[in-house]
Image: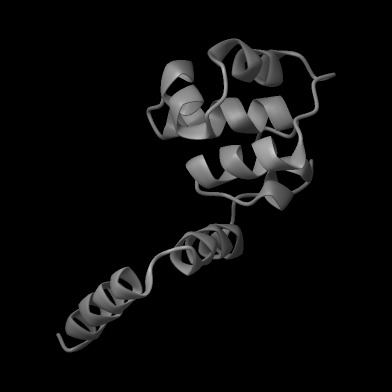
Amino acid sequence: MPTTLGQKIKKLRQDKGYSLDDLARETETSKSYLWELENRDERKPSGEKLTLIAQALDVTADYLLDEKANPDEAVLREAFFRKYNKLEADDKKKIKQMIDLWGKK
């Protein structure tokens, strides 16, 4: 399992089928900066950039920084709820309605 920040970013990016260009677009970052993060361990992103990268890859910034962390269910759940909490009230309501409908099956 990847342990460094760069290894984790690269694996998660590839697992999502993202090119460096795709992730750069999602995170408002340059492709070259992301390449450096993936390939040069001395690069350390700002908290803001790290958060954008984590959100785009559906994990938490804590997971990316912790060399011993695994992307377990708790990490994925926390990343989902962070995205959910940023939604508008109407969108949250729609998601709740979908969950309620699925629960009736």
Describe the colour scheme in one phrase. Answer: one colour
Question: Which residue is at the far right?
Answer: 42
> Is residue 55 at all visible to an observer of this figure?
yes
Relative horizontal placement of residue 54, taking residue 97 as reference (left or right)? right
Vertical order, 33 against 53 (above or below): above
Relative horizontal placement of residue 88, taking residue 103 as reference (left or right)? right
Vertical order, 37 against 5 (above or below): above
Of 52 and 104, which appears nearest the observer? 52
What residue appears at the point 80 percent right and 21 percent down from the top-left corner?
43
Of 57 and 89, which appears nearest the observer? 89
Of 72 and 42, which appears nearest the observer? 42
Task: Indicate the quadrant where residue 8 lies.
Answer: top right
Question: Which residue is at the far bottom?
Answer: 104
Give x and y (percent) for residue 71.
Answer: 60, 50
Task: Indicate the quadrant where residue 18 lies.
Answer: top left
What residue appears at the point 75 percent right and 42 percent down from the top-left corner?
47
Give x and y (percent) for residue 35.
Answer: 62, 14
Give x and y (percent) for residue 13.
Answer: 49, 30
Report the quarter where the N terminus lies: top right
Q: Count of labels shown? A: 0
Relative horizontal placement of residue 60, taking residue 95 as reference (left or right)? right
What residue appears at the point 37 percent right and 75 percent down from the top-left corner?
89
Relative horizontal placement of residue 23, taking residue 7 as reference (left or right)? left
Vertical order, 8 against 75 (above or below): above
Report the quarter where the C terminus lies: bottom left
> Is residue 57 at all visible to an observer of this figure?
no
Give x and y (percent) for residue 64.
Answer: 69, 42
Question: Which residue is at the far top?
Answer: 32
Vertical order, 104 against 76 (above or below): below
What residue appears at the point 35 percent right and 73 percent down from the top-left corner?
92
